[in-house]
Image (cartoon, rainbow, N blue to C red):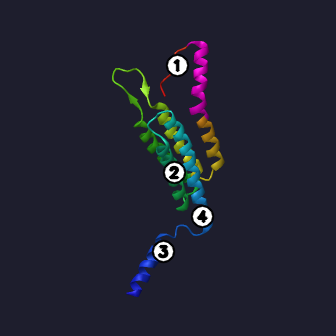
């Protein structure tokens, strides 16, 4: 019976052998945390604006995109072939974002485009973090947060000055 437990233990240990050392584990944790935190910040803004896709959705999209490229790197996929992984992320998240876009019957306005674009950009930010381009991911998230948070404020100020009707298509 002792031999069976040793075999089971050895099999379980082999199944968790993808992290060969502490630096690999640290790299994966950092990349996933950066992706999750940046996605969470963008999701917080969307949730604060009363949109359906909030913190958890954006965090999961960013971390999922990061994980897809991380696992591909661990499997030894070279940089030129990584484009296929990224294409799959873009297509998959595009489908997810399409589910947030609504056009009511008889209405001329389409709702959810900004949320869909935000989910798409969040996946790109997660992909950058997963590839080890954390500085690019952070800079992109800061710019996205500015677009989502600051531009509507600027639009309101300009609308008051010009008297134009506000754009509520977000």
Quarter occupied by the N terminus: bottom left
State the residue in front, 45 or 38.
Answer: 45
Residue 13's label in the rendered image is 3
Residue 5 screen position, x and y as percent: 41, 82
Query: Which label's residue is closer to the chain start, 1 or 2?
Result: 2
Disc on res. 24: 4
Magenta part of the chain: 146-163
CA gap between label 1 and label 4 equals: 50 Å
At mark 4, the secondary structure is: helix
Mark 1 vs mark 4: give the one in front. 1
Say which residue label 2 marks. 63
128 part of magenta stretch: no
| Marks 4 and 2, how far apart at CA | 17 Å
Q: Is residue 25 above or below residue 92?
A: below
Considering every residue shown, the one lying at the far bottom of the view is 2
Q: Position of residue 103 (x, y in %)?
A: 38, 27
Q: Residues within 10 Å of mark 2 (few under 14, many from 20)?
A: many
First of labels 1, 4 by sequence position: 4
Local secondary structure at mark 1? loop
Q: Which residue is mark 1?
A: 166
How far is disc 3 from disc 4 in space, using C-alphas? 17 Å
Q: Quadrant of residue 78?
A: bottom right
Label 4–label 2 contact, CB within 8 A: no
Q: CA distance from mark 1 to mark 3?
A: 60 Å
36 to 115, vertically: above or below: below
Q: Nearer the viewer, residue 8 or 149?
A: 149
């Amino acid at each position: 019976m002792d031999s069976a437990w040793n075999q089971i233990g050895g099999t379980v240990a082999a199944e968790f052998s993808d992290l060969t050392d502490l630096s690999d584990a640290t790299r994966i944790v950092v990349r996933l945390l950066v992706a999750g935190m940046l996605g969470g910040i963008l999701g917080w803004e969307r949730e604060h604006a009363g949109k359906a896709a909030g913190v958890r959705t954006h965090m999961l999209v960013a971390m999922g995109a990061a994980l897809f490229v991380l696992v591909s790197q661990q499997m030894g996929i070279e940089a030129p072939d990584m484009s296929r992984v990224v294409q799959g992320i873009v297509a998959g998240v595009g489908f997810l974002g399409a589910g947030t876009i609504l056009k009511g019957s008889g209405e001329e306005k389409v709702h959810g485009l900004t949320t869909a674009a935000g989910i798409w950009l969040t996946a790109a930010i997660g992909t950058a973090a997963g590839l080890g381009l954390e500085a690019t991911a952070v800079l992109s998230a800061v710019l996205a947060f500015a677009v989502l948070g600051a531009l509507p404020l600027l639009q309101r100020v300009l609308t008051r000055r010009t008297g134009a009707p506000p754009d509520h298509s977000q």
